[in-house]
Amino acid sequence: MTHLIRAATTDDLTALYDLSKLTGGGFTNLPADKGTLERKLAKSAEGFAREGQNQGDDLYVFVLEDTRTGAIRGTCQVFGEVGADRPFYSYRLSTLTQKSEELGRIFRNQTLSLCTDLEGSSEVGGLFLHPHERAGGLGMLLARSRYLFIKQHRPRFGNRVLAELRGVMDQAGHSPFWDALAGRFFGMTFPEADEFNAVHGTQFIADLMPNAPVYVNMLPESARAVIGQPHPTGRAALKMLENEGFVWDCYIDIFDGGPTVTAATDQIKTIRTADWLRVAGPIEGNPEKAETRMLATGMLDNFLCCYGQVTMTGGGELLIDQEAFDRLKLESGDRVLSVPRG
């Protein structure tokens, strides 16, 4: 395959902006706003350049490049720590049980409580693949490359990783959850609030959102039906996250009600199963028993990741197909992080 994951640079601004216009809205981490994207790339550059190996409020932006053409066909992001410089809000869905002796009945009511429980976690997000590239495992390459980066730089990340999935909205970009709840307090449509959040952050939530628990039964059916449900286009992403070991623990996005899933960092499947292996050199010829694996090398802004065809030597070293060997800028004796494609 000719696609490569690499660290984004300021030269990728136009390409990222073009991708952002294809998202259909609701992608807070990839807003169609050039100024915001420019600031994201600047923050990403600071994160890659930061010295030290402690967890911090870093952002790492990556792009998927077609090495034949140089075109940017996808992107993804990793956040070192959420809630470090501003509150990270979620709704927690819980159940309140009450009993009436007079009526002889037990009532169980679900409530939504505003919380910052997930602060200190790392986050994977901002994943978007060009609609014409959604085949051949490129979405999986983007998603899993983030876990290989985390493993390479493990001290920079927390003990828990979260992922927020876009919630359900109509074709015009309006969210029934927002319209039923937060929209009543903010005087904004969902697209307006989402854009404001992407550009200015979440402080306006703390300023205006009521702190009292919300009884789910008081919301209209249209809002209740979408609580914890991903946007239809995000179901494949949710499945990939679940395959990695992420679970939904009743946290939802306060804007659109989409699910926030979490996993213990060291138990994420890709992180747990990836191995450091030494490279013997490129494969000669085209062996029939070659296996497709994900391969990653390079630290921080030199990080590179792609699929490659590999075989093992009798000494446990890797032979890698010439194309991937060159794409990853490898030399014999280098180490790569390797994990099966499936």
Image (cartoon, rainbow, N blue to C red):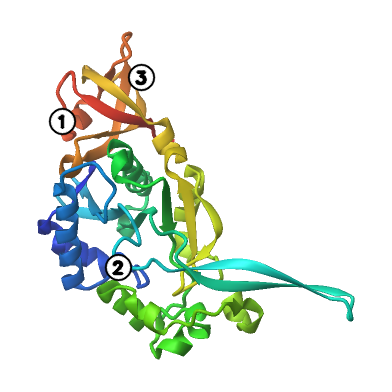
User: Where residue 198 sits: x, y (%)?
Assistant: 29, 72
Name the kind of residue labelled 1 in the image. Answer: Asp
Give the residue drawn at x 43%, y 38%: 266
**Residue under pointer 3:** 288
Residue 328: quarter of image: top left
Examine the rendering and report whether any part of residue 69 can be seen. no
**Residue under pointer 1:** 326
Q: CA distance from mark 3 to mark 2?
A: 40 Å
Q: Considering the image in quadrants, where does the N terminus appear?
A: top left
Examine the rendering and report whether any part of residue 5 can be seen. yes
Which of the two discs, 2 and 1, labels the residue nearer the N terminus?
2
- As drawn, is 164 to the left or to the right of 285? right
User: Where residue 339 sits: x, y (%)?
Assistant: 37, 31
Q: Nearer the viewer, residue 96 or 133?
A: 96
User: Where residue 149 sits: x, y (%)?
Assistant: 29, 41
**Residue under pointer 2:** 22
Give the residue drawn at x 60%, y 75%: 224
Secondary-structure class at tag 1: helix
Q: Could you classify mark 2 by the number of other residues whose Cα lies within 10 Å: few (under 14), some (14-19), or many (20 or more)? A: few
Which of the two discs, 1 and 3, labels the residue nearer the N terminus?
3
